[in-house]
Amino acid sequence: MTTPLFLSSGDLIADRRYQWAMDHLTLGDDAGAADILMQAIELAPDFATAWFAIGAIRDKQGDRVGAIVAFEKARDADPDDYHGARLQLARLGAGEATPEMTAVYVRRLFDQHAPRFEHSLLNRLAYSAPQKLFDAVTAAAGGRLRLGSMLDLGCGTGLAGAAFRGAVERLVGVDVSSGMIEQARAKGLYDRLVVGELVGFLRSEAEIAARYHLIVAADVFVYASDLAPITDAAARVLAPGAFFAFTLETHTGEGVVLQPTLRYAHGEAHVRAALADAGLRLVGIDGVSTRTESGVPVPGLLVISVAK
C-alpha cells in the first residue's frame, strides 16, 4: 500500500499517532496501523489523511464497505480532495462514476513525482506521445512543419516542447504542477512557462485575444473526465486554420470511464462530440499506444483537429 502524503490534522498528538501508524504499516502490521489511526481520529475526527489511510488499508484487506466509509470521511473532511478520495470511491463503485479530478489533487500528484517522472516515462513505460504527435502534425501540415506559436498544454517536464521546438518560433508551456514547470524550465526550451490550471489559463489567454497556431496536449486528458470544457477553451485561442493535437487513452465502450490506474479513458464518440461542440474540424483520429502499463501497450487515440 502506498502511504498517503501527509496533511496535518492540526492536533500534534493526532499527527504523531498517524506517524506511529505509518511505522507499523511499513513493518507490514496493517491491523496495528489501523488501530492507531482510529485513535488519531478519535482526537481529530476530520483528519482526512488518517481517514484516507484507513480506507486504503480496508481496501487492501478486501473490506469494500469499510473502505467506502473511510474514503467518504476523507472526502468530506477535505473538499479539495488532496488525496483523491473521490477517485477511490469511484473505483469502488460509490459516489460519482467519473468525478472531475481537482487541481489540488493533480498538482500534488505531479509535484510528488516531478524529479523522477521523465525517467519513469521514458525508461519504464516506453512513452512515445511527443514524437508521434510531431510526426502526425507534420503530416497534417503537408510534410513540412513551421509555425509561429505553440502552446504545450500540460507541458510536464517539457518532452513535447523538445519534440516541437525546432518547428515553432515561440513556445509556451503551462502545467498545474510547479515541480513539473521547474523541470521544463531547466531544459531552456520555452519562451514562456506558466504554473496554472489548464482551462483557467486558456480562458485568461482568450481574454487578451491570444492566438496560437498549434496547441499540443500529450497524454494530458487522461486526468480530465469531460473533454468539453477544455476543447471549448482551447478553440477560443486558436488562430484560424491552427491545429489542436492531443493523445489520450481510450476504451471500446461509450463515454468516459475511470480505469483502475485512476486515469480516464475516453470513448471515440465522446472525443468527436467535444471537438464538434467546440467548433473544431476533425482531421484525424487514429488508434495508437503511447505508453505501456506492466509491459502491455495501453490503447489510445491520437487526435488532430483544426480551427475553422
Image (tube, rainbow, N blue to C red):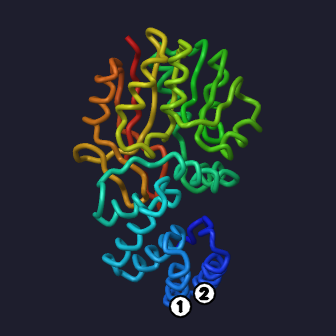
Locate residue 72: give its quadrant: bottom left
In the depicted structure, whether residue 141 falls above or below residue 25? above
Residue at position x 38%, y 61% from top?
A: 260
Element carrying mark 2: helix
Query: Residue 168: horizontal and vertical position, in percent?
Result: 63, 18
Residue 200 in view? yes
Residue at position x 44%, y 49% from top?
A: 101
Q: Is residue 164 left or right of residue 246?
A: right
How much space separates mark 2 and mark 1, taking CA atoms?
6 Å
Q: Amino acid at mark 2?
A: His
Query: Residue 174: horizontal and vertical position, in percent?
Result: 60, 33
Element carrying mark 1: helix
In the depicted structure, whether residue 267 falls above or below residue 259? above
- Structural crowding at the residue carrying mark 2, measured as other residues with C-alpha within 10 Å and reported as few (<14), some (14–19) or many (≥20): some
Query: Residue 273: horizontal and vertical position, in percent?
Result: 27, 29
Query: Residue 127: horizontal and vertical position, in percent?
Result: 54, 46
Callout 2 touching callout 1 (CB < 8 Å): yes
Q: Is residue 31 left or right of residue 111?
A: left
The numbered dot on residue 32 is: 1
In the depicted structure, whether residue 63 falls above or below residue 137? below
In the depicted structure, whether residue 9 falls above or below residue 171? below
Residue at position x 37%, y 35% from top?
A: 227
Residue closest to the eye, 244 or 102: 102
Q: Which residue is mark 2?
A: 24
Residue at position x 52%, y 28% from top?
A: 216
Q: Amino acid at mark 1?
A: Gly
Say which label, 2 or 1, has the lower sequence index: 2
Residue closest to the eye, 186 or 230: 230
Locate residue 281: give its quadrant: top left
Q: Is residue 110 left or right of residue 60?
A: right
